[in-house]
Image (cartoon, rainbow, N blue to C red):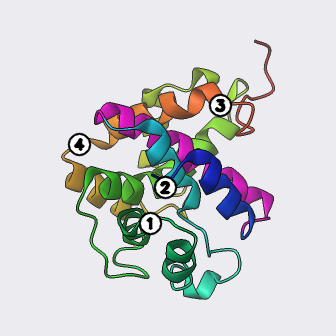
Amino acid sequence: MLTLERARELNDTMVTEHHLILHALNVCYAMGAMAAHFGEDPEHWQAVGMLHDYDYEKYPDEHLRHTEAPLLAAGVSPEDVRAILSHGYGGCTDVRPETNLEKSLYTVDELTGIIQACARMRPRGIRDLEVKSFMKKYKDRKFAAKCDRELIQKGCEMLGMDVRDVAAICIEGMRPHADELELAGTGAE
C-alpha cells in the first residue's frame, strides 16, 4: 500500500514550487480527515492526496497525462493511480470518480483552495476558522474565484454530502497542521 513517506518521495521528484507543495499538503491532510470520516486508512488517503498533482508543475497544459506510467513504474497501485486520475474528471480525464476515495479527492482538491484562502485572511488563520465563516466566503463567487464551486458541488453530490459538512471535515483535518500549511495566522495563541 502507498505510504505517505513514499508519496512524499515521489512528489518531491516532480514538485518544487512552494505554492504547489502547500496545495499538495492541504489536500493531503484534508484527505486524511475524509478517510477517517469514511472509516478508511487516513495515511493511505493522505498519500493519494499528496500525489494528486504529480505532473502539474512540469506539464500544466497536459495535467494527468504524465502521471499514470511513471507512478505505476514506481510501484503505485493501479487503484491509487486511478484515484489520482479521477480528480481530473470532466476537465483533463474521463476517469469518473466511483469510490469514496476518488469522490473525496475530486471534491477536496478545489475545496481546500477556498479553505486556504479563508484561513489566510484571518488573524488566527485556520486555528479558529468556523464553517459558518467559510460558507460566507464560499457563497461569494468573487472570493477565491479560480476555485470551481460547480465542481465542488458536483463532488459533494457524488459523496451524498453537503458542502458545509465536507468543509467541516477538511478544516478539522487541516487545523492540526496549521504551521506546516502556513495557515496559523499572525495573531497570538
Asked where in the image residue 67 lies, by quadrant, the reply is bottom right
Earlier sequence position, callout 3 versus callout 2:
2
Cα distance in 3D space between marks 3 and 1: 23 Å
The residues colored magenta run 15-39
Callout 3: helix, strand or loop?
helix
Residue 27, magenta (yes or no)? yes
Earlier sequence position, callout 1 versus callout 4:
1
Nearest-to-viewer mark from 4 and 3 = 3
What is the number of the mark on residue 177? 3
The residue lying toward the viewer, choosing from 114 and 43, is: 43
The kind of residue on which mark 2 rests is: Val
Earlier sequence position, callout 2 versus callout 1:
2
Q: Residue drawn at (58%, 54%), measured in percent from left and top?
A: 50
| Depicted 156 relative to depicted 43: above or below | below
Cα distance in 3D space between marks 3 and 2: 18 Å
| Depicted 108 relative to depicted 80: above or below | above
Horizontal arrangement in the rendering, residue 104 relative to residue 181 (left or right): left
| Overall secondary structure of the magenta section | helix
Pointer 2 residue? 48
Pointer 1 residue? 84
Nearest-to-viewer mark from 3 and 2 = 2
Q: Residue drawn at (26%, 41%), measured in percent from left and top?
A: 162
Q: Are marks 2 and 1 in contact (CB under 8 Å)?
A: yes
The kind of residue on which mark 4 rests is: Met
Cα distance in 3D space between marks 2 and 1: 7 Å
Horizontal arrangement in the rendering, residue 55 relative to residue 85 (left or right): right
